Image (cartoon, grey):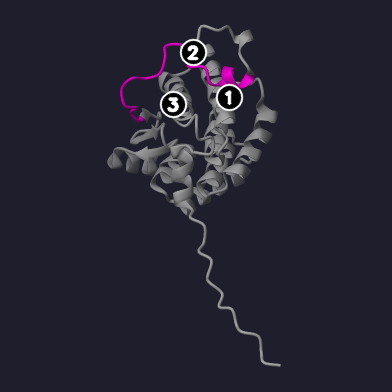
């Protein structure tokens, strides 16, 4: 770990500094999300179902935002989109649903658009209690967009905000683990700047580019 002060570092070096406490030495585990049956995979930066029964119970009795997270984790984008639309029809300014709407955009394969929408939300909610979740989601979107330096910036900001606010332990750990994932990837691929993060690879695999049909070339007509 570098002993250089923050003032001695370039902007990029500052972003890539290892957080206090160092990087995790053990394999990274999925993190509690605060929603029963769902955990965050900090390598793929997606929520995953780890207890199907608990997740189904959330779909039956949970609040709408928790239900959307479960549906996204199950890959049921149409149902998640319908629930977001229904909730926002009743409450257009529902913050959780506005953020989850950007998660739908990302899950649909358009991370750059998700970045733009989250940046607009951040302008609206800068310096409020909602900023940390927007910084975290911007980290997710930037990773999938291929900009790991921007992602590191956002995860570090989310971690700082959540630590300062004494947020729930799983929120602090999710920011820390995602930041560590980006830092580890950057360290491993230092000689290959174009190597995508596993989260970007996974996102691309969910939305492969359509195959381009070969077009038979016809010989010119005899003149």
Of the numbered discs in the image, which one, if any, rests on residue 166?
2
Crowding around mark 2 (Cα neighbors within 10 Å: few <14, some 14 to 19, many 20+) is few
Q: Give the mark nearer the N terminus: 3 vs 2.
A: 2
Q: CA distance from mark 1 to mark 3?
A: 14 Å
In the picture, measured across the screen, residue 143 lies left or right of residue 117, that is left
Mark in the foreground, 3 or 2: 3
| Residue 173 image position (x, y, % from top left) | 42, 21
- Above or below, 20 relative to 200: above
| Residue 32 image position (x, y, % from top left) | 37, 28
Q: CA distance from mark 3 to mark 2?
A: 26 Å
Q: Element at badge 3?
A: helix
Mark in the foreground, 1 or 2: 1
Q: Which residues are magenta?
A: 11-30
Crowding around mark 3 (Cα neighbors within 10 Å: few <14, some 14 to 19, many 20+) is some
Q: Element at badge 2?
A: loop
Q: Give the mark nearer the N terminus: 1 vs 3.
A: 1
Q: Quadrant of residue 216?
A: bottom right
Of the numbered discs in the image, which one, if any, rests on residue 153?
1
Mark in the foreground, 1 or 3: 3
Tag 3 residue: 184
Q: Give the mark nearer the N terminus: 1 vs 2.
A: 1
């Amino acid at each position: 770990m570098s002993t250089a002060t923050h003032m001695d570092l370039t902007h990029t070096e500052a972003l890539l500094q290892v957080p206090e406490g160092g990087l995790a030495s053990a394999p990274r585990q999925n993190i509690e999300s605060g929603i029963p049956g769902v955990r965050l995979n900090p390598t793929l930066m997606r929520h995953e179902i780890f207890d199907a029964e608990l997740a189904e119970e959330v779909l039956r009795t949970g609040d709408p935002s928790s239900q959307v997270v479960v549906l996204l984790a199950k890959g049921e984008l149409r149902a998640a989109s319908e629930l977001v639309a229904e909730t926002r029809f009743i409450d257009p300014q529902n913050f959780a649903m506005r953020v989850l709407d950007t998660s739908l955009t990302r899950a649909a394969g358009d991370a750059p658009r998700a970045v733009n929408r989250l940046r607009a939300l951040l302008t609206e909610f800068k310096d409020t209690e909602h900023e940390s979740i927007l910084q975290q989601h911007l980290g997710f979107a930037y990773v999938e967009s291929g900009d790991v330096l921007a992602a590191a910036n956002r995860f570090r900001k989310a971690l700082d905000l959540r630590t300062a606010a004494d947020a729930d332990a799983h929120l602090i750990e999710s920011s820390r683990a995602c930041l560590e994932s980006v830092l580890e990837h950057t360290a491993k691929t230092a000689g290959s700047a174009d190597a995508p993060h596993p989260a970007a690879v996974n996102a691309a695999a969910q939305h492969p580019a359509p195959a381009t049909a070969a077009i038979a070339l016809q010989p010119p007509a005899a003149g």
